[in-house]
Amino acid sequence: MTNGDSVRGNTALTPLDYRPAKMRIESITDETSDIKTFRLTFCDQDQNEQFEFRAGQFGLYSVFGSGEATFCIASSPTRRDYIECSVKRVGRVTNDLHECNEGDIIGFRGPYGNWFPLDEMEGKNLLFVGGGIGLAPLRSLIWNCLDLRDKFADILILYGARTVADLVYKEELKTWRERDDVKTIYTVDPGGETPDWDGEVGLVPVVLEKENPSPENTIVIACGPPIMIKFALFSMRKLGFPFESVYTTLENRMKCGVGKCGRCNVGNRYVCKDGPVFRYSDLLLLPQEF
Amino acid sequence: MSEQNLFEAPAGWLKSAVDALLSDGVEVVAPVGAEDGTVDLAPVSSSGAITLEYLNVNQPLKRLFFPQTEVLIEFERQDDGDIDVKSQSAPPEEEMVVFGCRPCDTAALDVLDKVFAWDYDDLRYRERRERATIVAFACTGPDPQCFCVPVGGSPHGSQGSDVLVFTRDDGSALLEVNTPKGEKLMERLGAVARPAQPDSGLPDVPDIHTGFDPEKIKLWLDDNFENEFWAGASLMCVGCGSCTYLCPTCHCFDIVDEGIWNRGERRRNWDSCSFGQFTAHASGHNPRPDQAARYRQRVMHKFKYFPERFGLVACVGCGRCLRACGVGQNLVSVLHDIEKT
Amino acid sequence: MKADGPATDALRKEAADLLSRGDVGVVIGYGRQDDADLAAPVFARNAEDADRLVFDDHCLGNLAVYLPRSEIRAMGRAGVVVKGCDLMAVNVLLRENVIKREDVVLIGTHCAGVGEPQLEKCSTCDVHSPEGCDVVVGEPVDQPKVDEEQRYKAAAEIDAMSVEERWDFWRSQFDKCIRCYACRQVCPLCYCKRCIVEKNIPQWVATSAHLRGSIAWNVVRAFHLTGRCVGCGECERVCPVGIPLGAINQKMSRHVGDSYGFHSGLSADQEAPFTVWSPDDSDEGIL
């Protein structure tokens, strides 16, 4: 829908037997009290070398015995040695994933789904709007863009979480802030600040309006909790951003990841195949069932 | 395909055919009666087990190609921390011949084929389909719940079957061959049936009394995702999965892990859009929070989304959902109500 | 009982009155759709709708299943048409504080039995005329004395088998289960917001339709209904693969009856055996 049919852009069918590749957990980073980031490498060296994906795509990660769960690939496709995913502890698989240790083997199927429109973004100003763990898909894209920095005009990252403790990728937030080719605005909800918090205090849409970025020649990529997205879009409309240049991701529940299991559809679109990345103007044409 | 596609078979042909196939080591699946009076497709070891007394088999044909539960992978944790992962072995190599399903169920294979082989090719489904030759029996006595005609089918529809059998009152039959697979089967059963003249005359097509226009229904669906109609139309639905599980085109599934601490298996199981937990996120958010949204999805999927996506209505009018529903939820009545608005 | 009989007339009048007075927001009753064998639920919202109500031999379902649902509660106070057997389920809903008596108007129907042929449960019915309703319509029916042995006939037939035969019997029955949960969804007493089979941390009951999972599911469900099931038989009636679920429930009901002298659903203020504790309790009834 948004771009191309699949990574391969092909017409031939890909054989599907649901067998996951084995990946080893190389390292685990505690992001918040209930979010961890896992760095993974394929157990099979050939797969490590061949694996390709694009920012925005997702995979089905499995703890053997618990089941599979869907997360975006949170690392950049330009970093070829590993992939990363950030996981919030909410259910059976995520609980068990949180119990895993470095060196443990987990399963992975993917990459699946479409990706952010990097071609369309070239030469444009980029505005990243993230909330909570919604920074995970943006992080993949942000590093992707930073690794190809010359191709884009101004970059603004606006990221918020409920509290300072809920901000993810804290080290990277610092790295981005220290760069002079990126502008960053970090915010926490009122009451979520700490005495030494030097960022903004306020909801993401409010901070967005205060910043008042120009819609001129700009692509917006917004990922976060549905309620934040909803209000951020109100703000963007106010600021004059056309919805054709706003992208977001959907996170409907999935089982197969490849357009068969019938679970993730929004209208006649499969989030696993036509998404997870959607142009907001396209999303408005679909039933609001996500 | 050769020109010759009609064959004449004498009374008792089915017994001869089944016995011949069984003695060749072919797996034969045919209608078998249970103690409670229901008839279902099941593997048979002799032609004697087969019954021909049924309107349709209780459970849909899809079970043979998309079973309600199946192992996808098996895994075992090794002493060194590695995990041994095995794909479940492929379906048996030997051929399978399925007798006795109805044209509605074979038409439904078209729907399943589209889903299981677009972009990604579901190997288990395809392998099962490939090894099966389908000999459908044309309907002689549809009941008031049957509605294949308005959804593009017919009691004599050949869509999806390799051979379609028209049985006469005296037990003799006319066999219409529709595919190369069917041709191969007829070659194999050379002694059972002989070529018939093209003017051998097919029996009259029995009437289906239910009518509606799926295109008209789609036009309404296009504009009425948000409509109070859905709350009313779904009010009696108690949210079980019997309509979806007995539906020959419904194909939603779940993937779950089962096992003990060091080994287990990953299974694919039928799942249903009628269930409240179907789309529920672990966070508690549910895009389809009530039965109205879930029932709407079922109707929309069959009569709007699937046609838009794959070019055909995902309903073959077998009527099982009407017959099975314990509370009397009636898809055809709902469609009639839509047509009237 | 015919659809155009006195019960239907009285029912329509009663429902129309309740609705036009604003006493209830909905009357849940039965209606006839085209020429279907089964009378399907009708949710009458106004006096005009009330004309769609009927009561006849085809009114098989137990409409108490709708009372706990949020869609119905949102309509306000609910009138519900209940046969004697259905009323027993309402009594349990009241006993278990799922619904409040003041939130429902019980429109009882004298009932001589339903179904063509008549349902098995009707032959041992001792509530042909429901008691405790706000109003009862139709013509009173003689209440024959019920043979206790007859009441538990289905369970007794299975009990008569050897242990091995019984195990084989139930295995072959549960092997048919397709896990559609029609039994649960149609049961007025299966009102849990999240069924144990949907709880997966840990996964108590395997969701796969293999024998192990389906035995676990059906047995766990029987346990959860023990001492609660009123024997309305809806689970067995709607099972699309014909599992004789009524026999399991009968077995458990008999067990509770023999051990505690308790028969669920006879009134709304019964003390259920597993919800009270007394020092005099015998330990023989532990299942």
Image: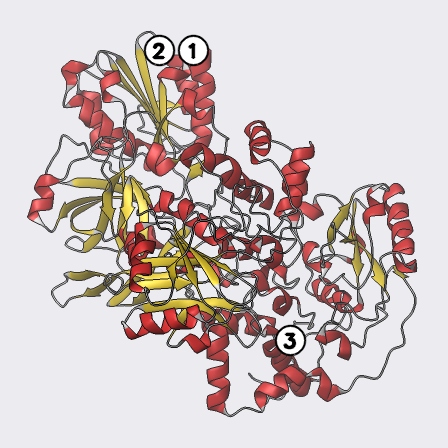
Q: Position of residue C117 (x, y in %)?
A: 74, 71
Mark 3: secondary structure: loop
Which of the labelled discs sits on residue A132, or is there none?
none
Above or below, comparing residue B113 to residue C131 in the picture:
above
Query: Gap in Å between the C-alphas at discs 1 and 2?
Result: 8 Å
Residue at (14% x, 54% y) in the render: A103
Residues tagged by mark 1 and mark 2 found on one chain of the structure: yes
The amino acid marked with disc number 1 is Leu
Residue B16 seen: yes
Above or below, comparing residue B330 to residue C64 in the picture:
above
Q: Do the CB atoms of the residues marked 1 and 2 lie less than 8 Å apart?
A: yes
Mark 3 neighbour density, 10 Å: few (under 14) some (14–19) many (20 or more): many
Q: Position of residue B74 (x, y in %)?
A: 24, 63
Badge count: 3
Which of the labelled discs sits on residue A213, or is there none?
2
Residue C101 falls left or right of residue B3? right
Q: Position of residue B10 (x, y in %)?
A: 45, 67
Residue at (30% x, 8% y) in the render: A217
Mark 1 lies on residue: A239
Query: Gap in Å between the C-alphas at discs 3 and 1?
Result: 63 Å
Mark 3 lies on residue: C227
Residues tagged by mark 2 and mark 3 found on one chain of the structure: no
Mark 1 neighbour density, 10 Å: few (under 14) some (14–19) many (20 or more): some
Residues tagged by mark 3 and mark 1 found on one chain of the structure: no
Mark 1: secondary structure: helix
